[in-house]
Amino acid sequence: MGQGRTQLGRRVRAAARSLAVLAALGVFYAAAAYAHNGHPKAGPAGSLHVSTSGALGLGADVSNLAAGDVIARTATLENRGRGAIGAISLAIDVTESSALDRDRSGLRVRVDRCPAPWTAGAGMALRCAGRMSQIGGWRPLAASRSPWQLGGLPARSTAYLRVSLQLPAAASSSLADRRTRIEYRFTAQ
């Protein structure tokens, strides 16, 4: 089974291949407003450092999504400052658009937060070892133009995010072979 894919996604993929309903998702990457590639930049009350690297990080590409697939990627948020960060938000920007991000039945997004690092569970699904907080339920990417409010972060602490993309099982065949490029921007207040 592929990294971050659900078992349901595999069954639907087999059916989708016979109908040639495959969607290709372009680059799935992140950019941080207050930190990028390990270079922290001081925020208003703390110092936010965002890590999106690794095989399952937001910086990893996603491709060949089939109807029903769910792909999860992670980001690590660290407050390296001496003061608390009152609010962190995540904006999802589309830099290369297609029907995948414009059609309300296209890609959907979900964000979850964990106090511990996400670990690969059965079938490579990402699991939270602590108490997971759902930041928001599944939202169509077409309706995700307003930032996700991630909450605050005390001084010298870390939070772990899981950002999941889903191509719904009922996705239209008109989404086949479409590409979308997404940029993630974190801001701190």
Image (cartoon, rainbow, N blue to C red):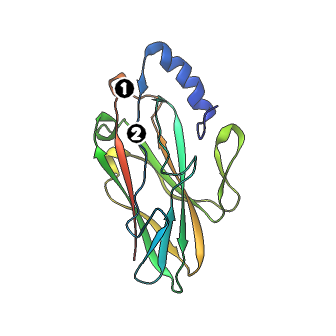
Residue 154: x and y in percent read 55, 79
Quadrant housing residue 130: bottom right
Measure the alpha-carbon separation of dots 1 and 2: 13 Å
**Kind of residue sitting beneath label 1:** Asp
x, y percent for residue 150: 47, 66
Residue 23 sits above or below residue 81 on the image? above
* Neighbour tally class for label 2: few under 14, some 14-19, many 20 plus, Cα within 10 Å: many
Q: As rendered, which of 140 and 152 lies closer to the eye?
A: 152
Residue closer to the observer: 47 or 128: 47
**Front one among 64 and 15:** 64
The label number, if any, that marks residue 177 in the structure image: 1
Measured from the top left, where is residue 77 in percent x and y?
53, 66
Badge 1 density bin: few <14, some 14–19, many ≥20, Cα 10 Å: some
Label 1 vs label 2, nearer the camera: 1
Q: Residue at x 57, y 47 (%)?
A: 56
Looking at the rendered structure, the secondary structure element under dot 2 is loop
Picture quadrant of residue 11: top right
Residue type pointed to by label 2: Leu
Q: Which residue is under mark 2?
A: 107
Is 50 situated left or right of 91 in this image?
A: right
Q: Please give left or right for residue 140 compared with residue 97 in the image.
A: right
Instruction: Identify whether 97 is placed above or below 116.
Output: above
- Relative horizontal placement of residue 115, taking residue 34 as reference (left or right): right
Residue depicted at x 51% and y 56%? 52
Q: Residue furthest top?
A: 18
Q: Secondary structure at mark 1?
A: loop
Q: Residue at x 71, y 58 (%)?
A: 129
In primary-sequence order, the first of circles 1 and 2 is 2
